[in-house]
Amino acid sequence: RASREKAEAQEITYTTDGARIEVFANLGKGAEEAASAVAFGAEGCGLLRTEFLFMERETPPSEDEQRAAYQAIAEALQHRPFILRTFDIGADKPVAYLSFPPEDNPQLGLRGIRAGLEWPQLLTTQLKAAASVTPFGCCRILLPMITALPELRAIRALLSQICADANLPIPPLGVMIETPSSALLADQLIAEADFLSIGTNDLTQYTLAIDRTHATLSKQLDALHPAVLRLIAKTAEAANAAGKIAAICGGLAADPAAVPVLIGLGVKELSMPAPAIPRVKALIRALHIETCRALAAEALACDSAEAVRALLQKEHLS
Ligand code: PEP
Ligand code: MG
C-alpha cells in the first residue's frame, strides 16, 4: 500500500466528486530539501520559512546570498509554485545581529512582519532578492504575523518601489492568517492580497492564549478547537468569495483527522512537511465534498477540541 501511495503521490489530487485539492510542501532548509519534496509528490512549496537563512550567524545574509539560495530552490522545484515567506524572526527565533527590546512576552512581541517593519533595510534586501527569482511569477511572497490592512499596504508600497527601481514585475503578495485579528478581517485583507495562507500553529496559540513553547500548557494546543475552526471557516469563505486561494500551511494540514474538515470548510490548498504528502493525497482521493461539508458543519458546532476529535473518530469508524 505504501508503494502505491508513493507512486500515486506524483499525480494531482481530486476528491471522488472531482474537486481539485492542491498539496504543497513546507520547506525550511534549502534546495536539497526542495528536491526531496518533489519526490514526495509536492506540487510546489506552500511555505518557505526563510528564517533558516538568517539564524545562527553573526551578520544578515546579503542580497546575492539570498538570491542564490532562493533561485536554487526555484530550480529544485522545477518552476513549480514557490511561496517564500519573509523572515519570521523574533519570539522563539532570535538573531544575534539585531537588538531586540526587552520583552516579557516575546510571542506577543517584535516578530514576523513587525520585525520587518522595525528593520526595513533587512526586509528591503530580502524583497529585492525574492522579486528577482526567475521565471517571474513562480515565486510568490508571503507575509507573516499580519494583523490588519495597513501592514500589508506598507509592504506592498515597499515592494512596488523596489520592483519599479529594478524594473522587475511585482510578484504576487499574500498574507499569513495566523492571528485572530487577521482571520476576522480576512475579507478586507483578501481585497488587497493576492492569496491567504493560514498558519494554524500561531492561530491556535493566539486564539487559545497558550504560548506554543510553554513547557506544560502547550499540550493543550489543539488546532481542531472549534474557535480555531470558526476562524478558518471565516478565512476560507472570504477567499472563496473573492475568487482567491486560502491555503493552510500550519501543522493542522498534515493531520489526517483534520483534512476532511478543512476541505469541508472550503480550503483548496494544503501545505505540509513533505513526508506527509503521500498519505494526505491518498486520503483526499477517498473524500466526497458534500460529506466533508456536513462534517465541517458538525465540527463548528462542537464545544471543545476533544468533542471535534471524538466526532472525527466516530466518522472514521463508520
Ligand atoms: C504557523 O504559525 O502555523 C506557521 C505555519 O508558521 P510557523 O510555524 O513558522 O510560525
Ligand atoms: Mg507562524
Image (tube, rainbow, N blue to C red):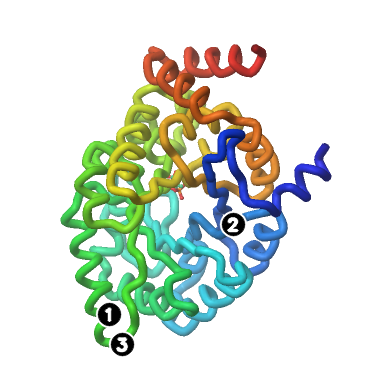
Distance from disc 3 to disc 1, alpha carbons, whole Å, reads 8 Å
Kind of residue at disc 1: Ile
Which mark identifies residue 150?
none
Q: CA distance from mark 3 to mark 2?
A: 29 Å
In percent of the image, x 65 and y 43: which residue is there? 276
Q: Quadrant of the C terminus?
A: top right
Instruction: Report which residue position mark 1 lands on.
Output: 162
Q: Nearer the viewer, residue 284 or 301?
A: 284
Q: Is residue 9 left or right of residue 30?
A: right
> Which residue is at 42% across, 36% downward?
266
Q: Earlier in the sequence, mark 3 or mark 1?
A: 1
Residue pushed farthest front? 17
Structural crowding at the residue carrying mark 2, measured as other residues with C-alpha within 10 Å and reported as few (<14), some (14–19) or many (≥20) = many
* Residue to which mark 3 is pinned: 167
The picture places residue 164, in percent across and down from the top left corner, at 25, 83
Which of 91/116 is in front? 116
- Circle 2 sits in a helix, a strand or a loop, which is it? loop
- Crowding at mark 3 (Cα within 10 Å: few <14, some 14-19, many 20+): few
Which of the 4 image quarters holds residue 87?
A: bottom left
Find residue 265 and report its image quarter: top left
Q: Crowding near pointer 1: few (<14 within 10 Å), some, many (20+)?
A: some
Q: Residue tagged by mark 2?
A: 43
Q: Position of residue 3 (x, y in %)?
A: 83, 45
Q: In the displayed structure, would residue 179 be above or below residue 97?
A: above
How many numbered marks appear?
3
Camera-near label (1 vs 2) is: 2
- Given the image, on which type of amino acid does mark 3 rest? Asn
- Image coords of residue 284 (percent x, y): 61, 36
